[in-house]
Amino acid sequence: MELRVTDLACARGGLPVLEGVSFALAAGRALILRGPNGVGKTTLLRTLAGLQPALEGSVSHPPETIAYAAHADGLKATLSVAENLAFWARIFGTGDIAPALDRMHLRDLADRPAQNLSAGQKRRLGLARLLVTGRPIWMLDEPTVSLDTASVALFGAVVREHLAGGGLALMATHIDLGLDEAEVLELSRFRADPRRAADVFDHGFDEAFL
Ligand SMILES: Nc1ncnc2c1ncn2[C@@H]1O[C@H](COP(=O)(O)OP(=O)(O)OP(=O)(O)O)[C@@H](O)[C@H]1O
């Protein structure tokens, strides 16, 4: 399996952000998106994950093959840790939540309502969701926010296991996850020409109205 992105252009809030984004990522590989604040890392991940349409270009894999971990953890506040994972396991059609509980060190917190977790514990639960999706391509937007050093190392190991199992990972992160073999894509060189704005509005897409 290889993820191929070809000449992708994407917009945010009705303005073009990136254009001509092309890369290929083989199974077992990770790609780290780099670039200054506002360059479009989140916008690219959202587009690839199918949360917003691309202006142009193509992606070899449909959103159904992608698990997206956004800035927000998307937890159900009143459900327990185990109930949150069971909810997602049902959504994604997978069964056993035990490996996710164990791997992300959540077993002792299994019965605690998500709203009573610390910020780092919430983040661990949000990331544990990846393990119950059963999806091969992980898209991670600053996954280490709120994680302490040990949890960063833990999650780095989880990502390496996913890659070793033939998965792929794309991530925007300023923190070293210890993925020495990861490739890096600098997005600055794909900044969109602001004169494309008229084209975007002609396409009638403006996130502000969604
Ligand atoms: N909801 C929104 N509506 C309109 N414009 C937005 C919205 N969110 C982001 N933008 C703009 O889109 C551009 C790309 O933002 P994006 O969040 O993709 O950048 P980023 O590289 O992920 O940034 P950071 O490193 O700060 O997380 C920026 O100019 C930003 O101001």
Image (tube, rainbow, N blue to C red):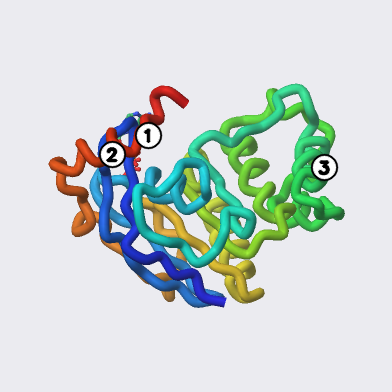
Secondary structure under tag 3 reads helix
- Ranked by sequence position, the earlier of labels 1 and 2 is 2
What residue is shown with label 3? 86
The residue lying at 79 percent from left, 57 percent from top is 99
In front: label 3 or label 2:
2
Q: Could you tell me residue 203's position as x and y percent? A: 33, 38
Beta carbon of the mark 1 residue lies under 8 A of ligand 1: no
Q: Is residue 109 visible?
A: no
Residue 200, numbered label? 2
What kind of residue is marked 1? Phe
Residue designated by label 1? 205
Report whether 38 appears left or right of 147.
left
Where's residue 148, x and y in %? 52, 45
Label 1 and label 3: CA atoms lie apart by: 35 Å
Name the one closer to the observer, 188 or 175. Answer: 188
The image quadrant that residue 91 belongs to is top right
Q: Against 163, is 109 above or below?
A: above
